[in-house]
């Protein structure tokens, strides 16, 4: 069965625009190979850029055991960060989203391009201007936040919004593997982790992303923000919910569900 990438990209974009969850693609096709899932993701990005968005960066998802267990999958995924998804303050208008969840993210701000193959964690640190704390708001376009790995790849890895902290540090100012994060919802701690929760080393995660893109003739670009993945599980962001990620060395980041 041939997968119609344009059709499924339109399907997911329409779901996001309408704020209505839709049935997973894999419930409607015999098979969705990973390569086709990334092709749908690329067509989705193409549509966003065609209507005036730009690219602010890229992301990894499912790089921690906490997230893989929560979502029932066992490998990382890669996606894009549109500029329109970068929050300018703490408030997250919920009427624009379907069933958002929030999660802490280590964010790398690149000073230089990174082009795979062969990118190492050391190369990532050399190419990084600073590391900052963040919170990603994810929002699956699928009913009940339920999907298989190819579904979530097609859906740009549930990317929806991201808050990026203003503090930060140089990439070698502290050991990223022992850098701590405490995630709180309405003042209650829901998860704690160190950077090592991200496949042993957050910089190695970013290297994986650069090498993945290199296989597709693409690269990470200077000035982009790169999310390495959440070290704890994601929590619902409801009206009035206040989520705070407190990082050692990086300060705190807060988002608040509004609407
Ligand atoms: O950023 C993420 O970890 C999202 C990966 C996709 C799975 C999910 O929606 O949690
Ligand atoms: Mg994430």
Image (cartoon, grey):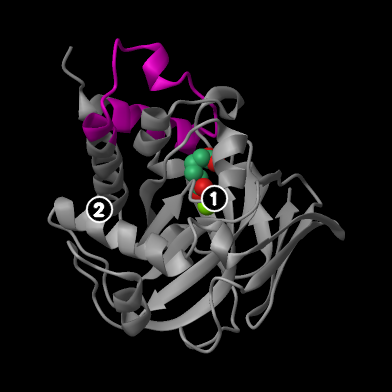
Point out which mark residue 212 bears. 2
Q: Is residue 114 left or right of residue 189?
A: left
Question: Which SS class for mark 2?
Answer: helix
Question: Which SS class for mark 1?
Answer: loop
Write down the quadrant of residue 175 in the picture: bottom right
Question: Which of these two is toward me, 149 or 85?
Answer: 149
Question: Which of these two is toward me, 233 or 1?
Answer: 233
Residue 235 placement (x, y as % from top left): 70, 45
The residue lying at 62 percent from left, 45 percent from top is 66
Residue 227 placement (x, y as % from top left): 46, 62
Label located before the other in sequence (2 or 1): 1
Write down the quadrant of residue 208 in the picture: bottom left
- 9 inside magenta stretch: yes
The residue lying at 25 percent from left, 53 percent from top is 212
Location of the N terminus (image quadrant): top left
Q: Is the CB–ligand 1 distance for label 2 below 8 Å?
A: no
Which stretch is magenta?
A: 8-37
Q: Is residue 75 left or right of residue 42?
A: right
The residues bearing labels 2 and 1 have C-alpha atoms spaced at a distance of: 18 Å
The residue lying at 31 percent from left, 12 percent from top is 29
Q: Is residue 56 something that shows in the picture?
A: no
**What residue is pinned by disc 1?**
64
Q: Residues within 10 Å of mark 2 (few under 14, many from 20)?
A: some
């Amino acid at each position: 069965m041939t997968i119609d990438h344009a059709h499924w990209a339109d399907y997911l974009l329409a779901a996001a625009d309408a704020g209505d969850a839709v049935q997973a693609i894999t419930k409607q096709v015999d098979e969705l190979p990973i390569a086709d899932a990334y092709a749908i993701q690329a067509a989705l990005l193409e549509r966003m850029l065609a209507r005036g968005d730009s690219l602010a960066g890229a992301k990894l998802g499912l790089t921690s055991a906490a997230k893989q267990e929560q979502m029932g999958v066992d490998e990382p995924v890669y996606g894009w960060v549109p500029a329109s998804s970068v929050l300018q303050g703490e408030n997250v208008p919920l009427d624009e989203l379907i069933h958002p969840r929030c999660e802490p993210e280590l964010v790398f701000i690149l000073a230089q391009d990174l082009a795979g193959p062969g990118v190492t964690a050391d190369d990532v640190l050399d190419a990084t201007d600073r590391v900052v704390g963040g919170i990603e708001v994810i929002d699956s376009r699928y009913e009940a936040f339920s999907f298989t790995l190819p579904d979530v790849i097609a859906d740009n890895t549930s990317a929806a919004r991201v808050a990026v902290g203003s503090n930060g540090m140089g990439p070698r100012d502290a050991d990223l593997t022992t850098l701590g994060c405490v995630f709180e919802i309405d003042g209650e701690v829901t998860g704690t982790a160190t950077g090592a929760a991200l496949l042993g080393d957050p910089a190695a995660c970013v290297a994986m992303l650069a090498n993945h893109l290199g296989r597709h003739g693409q690269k990470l670009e200077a000035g982009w923000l790169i999310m390495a993945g959440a070290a704890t599980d994601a929590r619902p962001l409801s009206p009035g919910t206040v989520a705070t990620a407190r990082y050692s060395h990086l300060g705190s980041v807060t988002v608040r569900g509004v609407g």
